[in-house]
Image (cartoon, grey):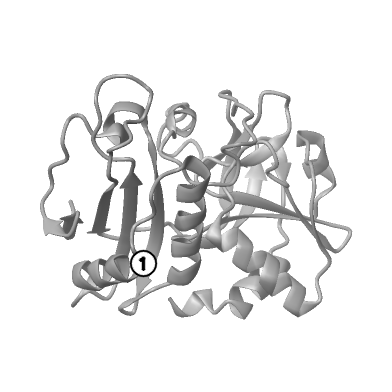
Amino acid sequence: MTLAMLINGQASNQIPADDRGFQYGDGLFETALLAKGQVRFLDDHLRRLATGCSRLGIAAPDERTLRDEIAQVTKGSERGVLKIIVTRGSGGRGYRPGSAASNTRVVALHPLNHVSQGALRLRWCEIRLGRNARLAGIKHLNRLEHVLAQSEWSDGEADEGLMLDTEGELVCATAGNVFAVRDGALITPDLRFCGVQGVMRAQVLKAAARLGLPVTEEPLWPDDLQAASEIFITNAVRGIRSVAALDSLQWSETGVAERLAAALSLSDT
């Protein structure tokens, strides 16, 4: 169910079949939380979208136009999930982008699904993320690896899955970034080869610095989690979620995650 949707500024739910986002995943998207009538961290989402457009060589939508359309689809709503999609637009058959293509933008508001409370139970995913430094960090439309990863388990078996890249490095959860606390320091994968530079991840890094928590972005491997005193997952919509278990590993500490959530006022949304 979609509460409201604009495609290129018009109320619609139809995209041309030759749109390159549909044909090739040639585009980007952002997903943000609408809470108390305001889009949380909107400036950061729009900044990452513009960065991704630049990286892919897609003409970025006018920011004022986007903000106006966001205001239209969220008007009168208190809570929901805002999704912005930008594609390279319609084009002929073949991978090579046409020089005349103009982008397609979709701005939509979706209901906020119920999120279970309590610490998460994780599993390792079998599907691996391919390395591509050119695409690392941005939120491009090619999410088939994450789709396949989430299809590996059924509801109730686990809450989330952790993903490695093809070389065995820990990258992320299927729908979020991962943080570990080790010897009082906060550590998160550096995402130099793949993965998304999450908006909530960036907020956590800033909040940790303000709180005086040592924080590093560095390569992490599965064995590194055994030495962690605390694990948590971050996501722009779901916030910060502590982890209770990963297969046979278990954690009971949640103090750092709670301090960060309080510093970012996430409990108020």
Which x, y percent locates residue 4? 16, 60
The image shows residue 139, relative to residue 183, as above or below, that is above
* Residue in the image at 86% along x and 64% along y: 184
* Residue in the image at 62% along x and 37% along y: 194
* Residue in the image at 31% along x and 31% along y: 98
Q: How many badges with numbers are in the image?
A: 1
Viewer-proximal residue, 234 or 195? Answer: 195
The image shows residue 34, relative to residue 2, as above or below, that is below
Question: In this image, 125 relative to 94: left or right?
Answer: right
Which residue is situated farthest in the top direction here?
94
The crowding category of the residue bearing disc 1, from other C-alpha atoms within 10 Å (few below 14, some 14 to 19, many at least 20), is few
Q: Which image quadrant for residue 199? A: bottom right
Which kind of residue does numbered mark 1 sit on? Glu
Question: In this image, 43 relative to 219: left or right?
Answer: left
Which residue is situated farthest in the right direction here?
183
Question: In this image, 161 relative to 247: left or right?
Answer: left
Q: Which residue is mark 1?
A: 63
**Does any portion of residue 24 appear in the rendered image?**
yes
Which residue is situated farthest in the front direction here?
99
